[in-house]
Amino acid sequence: MSRSSFALIGEHLAHSMSPFIHKQLFKLSGREADYRLIEIESDKLESEFDLTASQLKGFNVTIPYKQRVIPLLKGLSGDAEFYGAVNCVDVKSGIGHNTDAYGFLKALEVSGIELSGKVLVLGNGGAARTVAFEAARAGCEVTIASRSDKGGLLGKEIARRLGCEMEVLRFSDIKGGYDLVVNATPVGMYPNVSASPLEYEQLEGCRALFDLIYNPCQTKLMRYALRRGMKVGGGMPMLVWQAARSHEIWYSAEFKPADIEGIVELADAEMAAQFSGPRSIVLCGFMGCGKSSVGKALAAKLGMEFVDTDALIVEREGKAISEIFASVGEEGFRQIEHEVCVEAAALKNAVIAVGGGAMTYERNVKAFEGCTRIFLDAAFDTVKARIGADKSRPLFDEGAVKLYNSRLPLYKRASDHTVDANGGIEETLERILDLL
Ligand code: S3P
């Protein structure tokens, strides 16, 4: 059988587990296929969609495009129509499907958790919507806990469409007593693993918890529930089952529950390996702030690997930065830079110096989310004196002061720490070591 292509389409995909899971599913069904991550920028989804789809046999769709792809498709399956959201597309038929709800129901089943009685849904985003609709459809008495008025709107929509009663609460009013609590908020997700959407006391008298978060595989909320002797399920089985359902749609695959369970275990292990261990350190700031020189010294001191995204770009393209700007323009350079940032973000235990413009792009900030990000803050006069007449930086021209001022707030927002970098290398290094 010839090799065929599948993919996940979304905006920020650097930390996705989907390639790992889908590759395992292809292996299990004995198919030769690849599964890629395709990031599409928000303003390009409509214009790039057809060409991207034409190169694939099938694909998954993730936030923020689950609704936006609908008008681009030929039709919808019953579930996709019901939810108004698509996460799986079969290219040949052009039909969009929704396998998230299926994944949720299967994951409950394999965790031995029943969808019945009083169900509390935490959150009001896309995942909460799926869970609340499924629970109401199964005849449960559903409460939605929400931080904003959106929870009220979701409650009203479900009540109107399914003709049932819905309760909406503030988080602080939750007192326990539910047969099932489902966390559909991101609270407690990596890297904020010490957070929990509920306190231990608020689970009083509850019987089961299903947490949609899959990273980490055991959240703080799950630990609270285990301490109470509740039945507990996590998000990885849901992720794997919704993926497995996509294969059933694409080429009528059939999987045994025990095989899927094996993939859940492998995916948990892979994720733990990817996300545990030492965090890399990212140094950002304007040209000439000392990212490379301080970065090298820091890496040597901490026994870590040093990488410089500009150097990786030059190596990859076989051209100097100024030549890349001249041939593909700044936009072309930023695309290459982003791909290099995603690669660098996957490194463990490295000090990563990023080009002066990198962290002014949200997609790169996202890619480095799991790293400790430090802004090297040097005054404009300092960087000017350091760079001098060096012509290797195409953007250090008459407009540099303006660029500098517009970027300062972006560097700060993208970083966990700001360090004064006006002094010498040793001085800045000491400041960073104090902080770490
Ligand atoms: C740039 C900074 C440079 C390099 C490119 C663009 C920028 O890196 O990536 O010339 O936009 O500020 P350094 O900050 O390492 O000089």
Image (tube, helix red, strand yellow):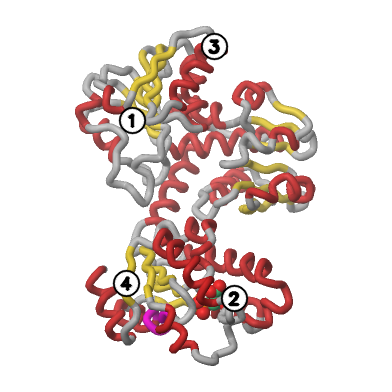
Rate crowding at label 3 as few (under 14), some (14 to 19) or many (20 or more) other CA atoms within 10 Å. few
| Predominant secondary structure, magenta span | helix
Q: Is mark 3 within 8 Å of ligand 1?
A: no
Q: Position of residue 195 (x, y in %)?
A: 29, 43
Q: Which mark is residue 232?
A: 1
Alpha carbon separation for disc pair 1 and 4:
43 Å
Helix, strand or loop under label 4: strand
Q: Position of residue 350 (x, y in %)?
A: 40, 71
Identified at 23% across, 32% down, the residue is 199
- Of the image marks 3 and 1, the number of the one nearer the N terminus: 3
Q: Is mark 2 within 8 Å of ligand 1?
A: yes
Helix, strand or loop under label 1: strand
Alpha carbon separation for disc pair 2 and 4:
26 Å
Helix, strand or loop under label 2: helix
Identify the residue position indicated by label 2 in the image.
Answer: 313
Q: Is mark 4 within 8 Å of ligand 1?
A: no
Amino acid carrying mark 1 in the image: Val
- Of the image marks 3 and 2, the number of the one nearer the N terminus: 3
Alpha carbon separation for disc pair 3 and 2:
54 Å
Q: Which residues are magenta?
A: 289-295
Helix, strand or loop under label 3: helix
Q: For residue 133: magenta?
A: no
Q: Which mark is residue 291?
A: none
Identify the residue position indicated by label 4 in the image.
Answer: 419
Q: Is residue 180 above or below residue 347?
A: above
Q: Position of residue 310 (x, y in %)?
A: 54, 77
Alpha carbon separation for disc pair 3 and 4:
54 Å
Q: Nearer the viewer, mark 3 or mark 1?
A: 3
From this viewpoint, is residue 142 visible?
A: yes
Q: Is residue 22 above or below residue 208?
A: below
Q: Nearer the viewer, mark 2 or mark 4?
A: 4
